[in-house]
Amino acid sequence: MLRVVLCLAPGAAVQLYFFGAAVLLNLLTAGITVLACEAVCAHLSGKPVAERLLDASWLVTACLLALALPPTVPWQVMGIAAVAAVGVGKYAYGGLGNNIFNPALVGYAIVLVSFPKAMAWPTLHDGLSGATALTTFKYRGAATVADIWTPLNGFGTFGGAQWEWLNLAFMLGGLGLIAWRLIAWRIPLAMLLTIAVLAAIGYDNGSSRSYGSPLFHAFSGATMLAAFFFATDPVTHPASHKAQWLFGILAGAMTFAVRALGNYPDGAAFALLLANAITPYLDRRWSLPVKAHDQ
């Protein structure tokens, strides 16, 4: 768990650079609220509180919530996300190891649909944020890509300079997870390849009907955070190699479908929750045990 938190550090550092001290406040608020919820839920469920706190799973949940939610989100919304993540996403199913859905995703999705205004990311100095870039692209009307995009040198031509750096940082952290053999690498690879293939099919050199280039979808929104850190929760993804490929393909296809055709600019959270729900079927259909070192 501590290695996962360490791999989140590059993304946290980039967020801190672009959004300031509010990111630290998010981390502190999420840490306190998730820790308190974990202790209360463990006590109420009759589980050893100290043991539950020492496994540090609550710390990963807190960091994921803090980095997924906007730095301007009110503390009350963060509190609701924490209660939903720990109470509903984890302990409603029996605690760590028994949950069907990624706890942090549950908390994130609940506040996303309940407090849409509070979940808007602040506008950055180039006029684009993660949600704003996807939203602007989605609701651009008859404008072409060139009409709404202001190319910058280097990063900035795909999905907004800051968010491209942020996605790159999370990708580097994800590669660290793979190097440490902490995650099933097939899942992020399948998810990212699926998004890239569908984006390439829907891209027509930037007309008003274009769904966006593969690079746009890879480096905007929460793509890398979702692919490497949310999708790879070992409790909520399938065990067999074949099922992991299918899981990643489903997550990538649904993410792109929501972005291109749905009401929300970014569909990663909903896509992964749906994939989590199908995991028990995939495990029964292809029940091939995989040892941890063989991931």
Image (spheres, rainbow, N blue to C red):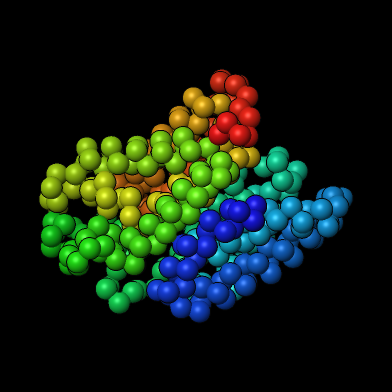
Question: In which quadrant will I find the C terminus?
Answer: top right
| Residue 95 horizontal/vertical position (percent) | 74, 46
The picture quadrant where one finds residue 79 is bottom right
| Residue 116 horizontal/vertical position (percent) | 45, 64
- 14 lies above or below 84: below
User: Looking at the image, can residue 276 be seen?
Assistant: no
| Residue 123 horizontal/vertical position (percent) | 34, 74
- 24 lies above or below 254: below
Q: Residue at x 74, y 65 (%)?
A: 36
What number of labels is visible?
0
Q: Nearer the viewer, residue 177 or 33?
A: 177
User: Looking at the image, can residue 97 be seen?
Assistant: yes
Q: Residue at x 61, y 27 (%)?
A: 290
Q: Nearer the viewer, residue 116 or 134?
A: 134
- 106 lies above or below 239: below
- 186 lies above or below 41: above
Q: Nearer the viewer, residue 209 or 14?
A: 14
Q: Residue at x 26, y 46 (%)?
A: 214
Query: Relative to residue 23, is residue 193 drawn left or right?
Result: left
Query: Relative to residue 125, is residue 109 drawn left or right?
Result: right
The picture quadrant where one finds residue 39 is bottom right
Q: Residue at x 72, y 46 (%)?
A: 96
Query: Relative to residue 145, is residue 131 drawn left or right?
Result: right
